Image (tube, rainbow, N blue to C red):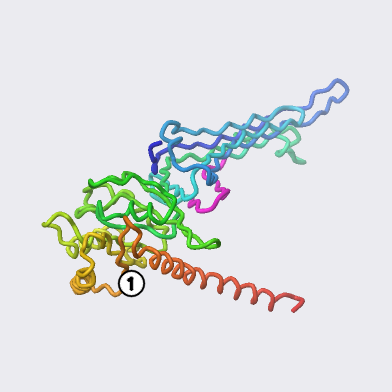
Amino acid sequence: MKFIDEAKIFVKAGDGGNGAATFRREKYIPMGGPNGGDGGRGGSIYVIADRNINTLVDYRYTRKFIGKRGENGGGADQYGAGGDDIVLRVPVGTVIYNLNTEEIIADLSEHDQKMLIAQGGKGGLGNIHFKSSTNRAPRQKTNGAQGEEFELRLELRVLADVGLLGLPNAGKSTLIRAISSARPKVADYPFTTLHPNLGVVRVDDEKSFVMADVPGLIEGAADGAGLGIRFLKHLQRTRILLHLVDIAPIDPDSNPVRDAKAIVGELVKHDPELANKPRWLVLNKLDLIPEEDREKAVKDFLKAYKKATKYDGPYFPISAINGEGTKPLIYAISEALDQMAKPEIDDDLDELESTEENSPEA
C-alpha cells in the first residue's frame, strides 16, 4: 500500500436543536403553563490515535465529516435527543493543523490518545426556562448554536528513537536491513527509498529501539529538489540522527566531505531545530576500501570534515552490507538513549518525593 503521510479534510460538528415554545393543554387543567423542552446538542467530532493504523490513506478518499444535528425540543417537557459524535481514527504520531491559521489543534503521540477537534452546538432553550412571576406565559425560546467547523491538515510524523540521514545510496536502507527486521528495497541506483521505513533494533532480550529510514537528501533539497525534504518531518520526533556518509563513492567526481557538509547545510536551512539534535557520523562502505588503507581514509575524512563543519561528535566506521562495525554502533545508541531517558525518570522521582513530603500524613 502506498505510504500516505498528509491529508486535508473538512469537519463540521452538528448544530444544536431548537428549543420549543409550547403550553400545557389538558382537559381538566385550564391554567396549563409553558412546557416547551430544550433542543439536543449537536454531535461533536473527536480524533483518536490507533497504533494499528499506519497511514492516512482513509482521509485521501473521504474528506468531509459532518456531525449529526441535535433534535428539536417538544411539548410536554420533551427534550430533543443529542446528535451522535463522530470519532476519527488516525495513526499514532499524527499532528492536526488548522489549515487557515496553521495552528496545531492536536498532537497525537500515544495509543488511544483522544482529542476533541470540533465541538457540537448547544441545544436551544425551551420556553419553560423563561417563566417568571411576571411572565406566566412566555413565548420566548432560543435556537440551537451552530457546531464548530474547520478545514484541517493531517500530517503523520513517524515515531522513532533514531533517524537515518544522508544522500541517496549512502546505505541507509542497507543499514536498517542489517540491524533490524525491516526489509526496505535496496538497489544500486539513487532514490530507491520512496517512503519512510521503520525497523525495531533489538539490543538484547530486554532492550530495543526504533530506527527510521527516510528518502535521501540531495543538495538543493530545501529549495524543492529531490524527495527527502518532504519526509524530514518524520525525523523531528527522533532523539538521535545518524548521518550516513559513503566514504568510498564509486563516482570519481564525488567528494564525501563536500557531500556530507551539503547535507548538514540543507538540514540547517530547512529546520534549525532538527539540525540541533544529536547527530552522529556513520562512515559507511568500509568494505570497498582495502583493509590496509581504511584507517588512513577515515582519519583523512574526519580531519577535513571537522575543519569544514567544526564537528566534534562521535563517529563510527562501518560496512552495512556485511555488518562490520554495526554492533558497537547499536550498543552506543542504546546507551545514549538510556542516558537521555534518565533525566526524565529522575524528574518523575523528584516530583513523587515532593508530593509525599507535602502530603498531610508526612
Quadrant, the C terminus? bottom right
Residue type marked 1: Pro
At which x and y percent is residue 119? 55, 42
Q: Is residue 139 left or right of residue 308?
A: right
Instruction: Say above or below: 284 vs 17.
Output: below
At which x and y percent is residue 10? 44, 36
Q: Residue at x 40, y 39 (%)?
A: 8
The residue at which mark 1 appears reads as 314
Foreground: 244 or 261?
A: 244
Foreground: 143 or 332?
A: 332
In magenta segment, residue 109: yes
At which x and y percent is residue 334? 46, 66
Q: Residue at x 48, y 62 (%)?
A: 203
Identify the magenta region: 106-120
In magenta segment, residue 274: no
Q: Is residue 123 left or right of residue 35?
A: left
At which x and y percent is residue 108? 50, 51
Instruction: Say above or below: 353 vs 106.
Output: below
